[in-house]
Amino acid sequence: MAETLERLERQAKAAATVGAHLILFAEGALHGYDYDMTAESVRAVAEPVDGPNCRRIRELARHLGIIILAGFFERHDDKIHNSLLIARPDGSRSEEHTSELQSPCNLVCRLLLEKK
């Protein structure tokens, strides 16, 4: 997982360098996505939205001054969700469960308008 986080960091830094306001990573990007995953393997890597890897992405968004959206496997109580972490430059965060996500395009537009 450390290699995956380092790759996300490199890509986010590159995006910020060219003036991007937002970078969107794929489903499961924070923990890596493998088509051979099982319920047990997902449960093993899942973390709460305030877990160490999510905090690292939030710190990166704050440091770079961009919005970072990254898919992750969220542990919430006794459930696991396929979620989207939204890390903002002001240090705030929110999450969307992908099963409840209405329209990624609408979400991205809303986030970009918040930044202005």
Image (cartoon, grey):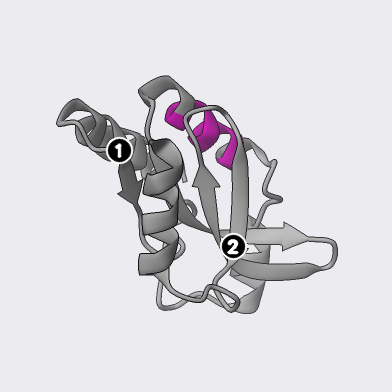
Instruction: Name the image quarter holding the C terminus.
Output: top left
Asked if 12 appears above or below 27 in the picture, the reply is above
Local SS, label 2 = strand
Say which residue appears at 32% left-offset and 46% top-offset. 23
Q: Which residues are magenta?
A: 54-61
Q: Is residue 47 magenta?
A: no
Mark yes or no: residue 36 visible.
Answer: yes
Say which residue appears at 43% left-offset and 74% top-offset. 103
Q: Is residue 57 magenta?
A: yes
Say which residue appears at 77% left-offset and 60% top-offset. 76
* Residue at mark 1: 21
Local SS, label 1 = loop
Say which residue appears at 67% left-offset and 65% top-offset. 43
Residue 96 numbered tag: 2
Q: Tell me the quarter of the picture where residue 74 sits.
A: bottom right
Residue 21, image x, y percentages: 30, 38
Q: CA distance from mark 2 to mark 1?
A: 20 Å
**What secondary structure is the stretch in magenta mostly built from?**
helix
Residue 112, image x, y percentages: 37, 46
| Front one among 11 and 4 | 11
